[in-house]
Amino acid sequence: MKLSSQQDFQAYAADARKNWDERFGGSRWIISVGVSECSKAKGVQDTLSNLELHLDNSGLDYEIRHVGCAGWCFAEPYIEVSPPDGPPIIYGNVVTDVVPELVQAFKNGQFPTENALGVRSESAFEGIQPLSEHPFMKGQRRLLMERSGVIDPESIEEYIARGGYSAFVRALTEMTPEEIVHEVKESNVRGRGGAGFPAGIKWESGRRTQAWPKYVVANSHEGEPNVFKDRRLIESDPHLVLEGIMIACVALETPHGYNYIGGEHVLALSRFQKAVDQAYELGLLGENVLGTGKSFHMRVRSGGGAYICGEGSALMYAIMGERGQPRTKPPRSVEEGVWRRPTVLNNTETYAAVPSIINNGGAWYADIGTDESKGTKLVTIQGPVKRIGVAEVEMGFSMRELIEEIYGGAKDGYTLKGIQMGGVSAGPLRMDQLDVGIDFESLDEVGAMLGSGGFVAFDESICAVDFARYLTRFNRYESCAKCTPCRLGNKALLEIVDKVRHGQSPADVAALIQGTSDNIIDLSLCGLGQVAPMPLLGMMKAFPEEFEAHFREGRCPQGQCTVSQPHIRLEPVAAD
Amino acid sequence: MAHSAPASADIDLEPLRAILNEHFNPENYQDSLELIVQACQEAQHIYGYVPKAATELIAEHLGVTTNRIYGLLTFYADFLTAPPGKHTMLLCHGAACYVGGSQKIVNYLDQQYDVDSGHTTRDGTLTVQYVNGCLGVCDLAPVAQLDHGPYYGHLTVESFEELLESLRNDDGSSEDSDETE
């Protein structure tokens, strides 16, 4: 079916809503199963086949549907049970062993409280608390993840039934491009990739540059070793990201949209491609969209495992079939980007915020968050905490509350030592420094960085020097080798840290590290090099006593570095 | 480790040719350039690596040079230019896995097998690729994915050793291997 006018779309949306209501208001049991990369890893395929088997035997009138990931990785695989009369209940950790008892209970009209995460309702049901009261959900404010885990990511109809594409259609048929840019500017949504540049200003510059064609590009590369928000969002609600990019295309008056997705995100790639195919089939992409005479096209491109391709100019070279290596700026990408044409490049998460800004107005969005950092932020955690997952919190939310309440604090048997911030581009916060807001300014002030919102909790057994070495090694390995300060400087830095780890610190090593770092920071060509030494410097600042123990006493308090394993100690080297 | 690919004559190019004909139809040179990486991904998907003959076919099909293709193959960490071992493993070395102890497994592979990322064990059982980014299943950290299928979570040096042992002993199929906890 192809929609050819705004009225067509409204009629389609009304039908979709009606189908949704009938489906969930009927006499059937609807069992929604979260299928994403993380639930697959945890055996959701087995859960699915087992569910089918037992539900078939139970004689219940049921339907199994797939949904995306709702962020609670700690509870995968999960199912949401919508009984014919009663609110939907979410059960976590539904491994195959749990299935028979659960299904038997449903058949008897019972709802076990064990494994229940919560019920989607205002009040408790059968002793199960509302989902919004679950400690993981309580502090969250979900705008981008509103539909994640609710709709089938592979169904455009379900997306539209839940209000999807209304912003795109509105932007296309009722707003001028200037009005769209105005709303985005007023919302003051800032780049979610890490730099925090206001998207509206970028769009405005993109409009001002008079060269054609223009391009709109989404950066879904997500190559950091410690963040997985974009891929979960695309796996769970790909149309939301697509709609955001399409609205930017309307604003820039260009038919050319791109999404660059990291090649390792296999499921995100296939689901986004499917979303694009469905949008073409429905006539939201293609020629003469909804009879407006305007055309919109979307290309999905991917790379092959190079962190640097997340850098703006490198990403554009990667799209153009070149090695993904950054270049000097200016010209900035809004002047010369993909194919040397004006290009607006934003992060996946930034585009995902756009539909709600168009629907509710920029002023509404600007009301959420802090004075300078607006809206909500997707954050992920890794390491030994109780509840690993993707959370969405209002900008300015307390870091301590996030770690201790939402993520549940340290796992049993672990004592947390700190949280590594800003991916591989900043230093950590010690546990006594967590009373800080999660927004661009507050975190900059304490010398950390919001970055893309990937946090790593590490415990007392982790040696700060060894962790710093890991982060430095990452940047050294991922240096594209184009400019010398980054290529050789990070190598030198890694060598110095390795000497320290082997108990052979050169004289005045702290000054040597600082000096080498300064050179890398000052002289490197792109953002990777300019921040590459930050994790090491940050670790040194946060845990000076540990570094001192290595420097002066040749001792690793955590017993992790080679220095404490004399049998593989290196031969002494000549004094530096 | 590279450049030991079998002679081109051994490679059946028909499956790749079919995909290229169906999905890779550039309208101009710009399109051709944009499609190189994806074409190589298809080749790696089919053959487990990107054989020389495949690069020649892609070059001919897209109208680009093989040199340009090799420029990309050697830039991106995901591509293999030599045949992998019987099994391929993505060993996640993201921050969560590091905090969970993946460095020990990396060291173990280095010390016991003299194997680094992209290398194959001498007996040809396993090719390991370190995922420098993140597999995104951090709840299972440290984690590895075998043959783009099952995940093995909460790895330790001991459980990793067992996994290697079982791979060495089985005769090629990993179909019914279960995820270990």
Image (spheres, rainbow, N blue to C red):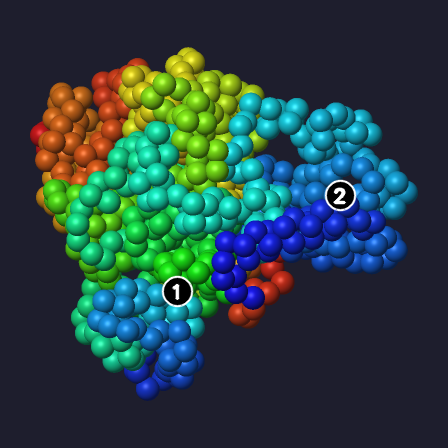
Q: Are marks 2 and 1 in contact (CB under 8 Å)?
A: no
In the image, A506 versus A87, the foreground residue is A87
Q: Residue at x 77, y 45 (%)?
A: A25
| Direction from residue B29 to residue A21 in the image, left or right | right
Would you call the spot at circle 2 few (<14 residues within 10 Å), some (14-19), or many (20 or more)?
many
Chain letter of mark 2 equals A
Q: How far across and how far down the image is residue A517, in percent? A: 16, 30
Q: Residue at x 59, y 28 (%)?
A: A136
Residue A562 in sight here: no
User: Label 1 sits on what residue type?
Assistant: Glu
Would you call the spot at circle 1 few (<14 residues within 10 Å), some (14-19), or many (20 or more)?
some
Circle 1 SS class: loop
Q: Are marks 2 and 1 on the same chain?
A: yes
User: Label 2 sits on what residue type?
Assistant: Ser
Circle 2 SS class: strand
Q: Residue at x 13, y 28 (%)?
A: A518
Vertical placement of residue A113 versus A396, above or below: below
Q: How far across and how far down the image is residue A536, in percent? A: 26, 28
In the image, A493 versus A502, the foreground residue is A493
Q: Residue furthest bottom?
A: B9
Mark 2 or 1: in front is: 1
| Direction from residue A162 to residue A466 in the image, left or right | left
| Direction from residue B10 to residue A140 in the image, left or right | right
For mark 1, what is the residue? A287
Vertical placement of residue A137 versus A31, above or below: above
For mark 2, what is the residue? A82
Specify the quadrant of the image occupied by residue A7.
bottom right
Chain letter of mark 1 equals A
CA gap, disc 2 and disc 1: 40 Å
Q: Residue at x 85, y 53 (%)?
A: A60
Q: How far across and how far down the image is residue A148, in percent? A: 56, 42
Vertical placement of residue A202 versus A549, above or below: below
